[in-house]
Image (cartoon, helix red, strand yellow):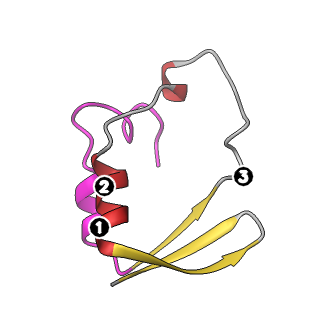
Amino acid sequence: MDPGHANGPDSRLAEDIASADVLVLTDRYDAWTEPKASARDGPDAPNAVLRERFGLRAMHGAYAIYTRR
């Protein structure tokens, strides 16, 4: 994901997530802070798609694997 695009107001991230069968997400960089626009939260739509359409299937270290319900 390209910061600044993925969290921008015209982001297609929610659409891309909705078309996926599997998602691999990480919290590895959650504590990373920098004074740039890419550190700002974007729209909640991608999170809503994840909550509504996917279920957590496995955890491996800092990685979470979600599959379509």
- Kindly report the distance in space between the C-alpha atoms of the residues bearing marks 1 and 2: 6 Å
Q: Relative to residue 66, is residue 18 depicted above or below? A: above
Q: Which residues are magenta?
A: 1-21
User: Where residue 61 sits in the image (x, y, percent)?
Assistant: 78, 69
Tag 3: amino acid: Arg
**Do labels 1 and 2 touch, CB within 8 Å?**
yes
Q: Position of residue 40 (x, y in %)?
A: 48, 25
How many C-alpha atoms fall within 10 Å of the one at disc 1: few (<14), some, or many (≥20)? Answer: few
| Residue displayed at 62% across by 15% down | 35
Residues 56 and 1: in front is 56
Q: Quadrant of residue 53?
A: bottom left
The residue drawn where x is 67% and y is 76% is 59
Q: Secondary structure at mark 2?
A: helix
Front position among marks 3 and 2: 2
Q: Is residue 62 above or below residue 55?
A: above
Q: Residues within 10 Å of mark 3 (few under 14, many from 20)?
A: few
Query: Tag 3 or tag 1, which sits nearer the N-term?
Result: 3
Residue placed under numbered mark 3 in the picture: 28
Residue underneath mark 2: 48
Residue identifier under label 1: 52
Q: Is the magenta region chiefly helix, strand or loop?
A: loop
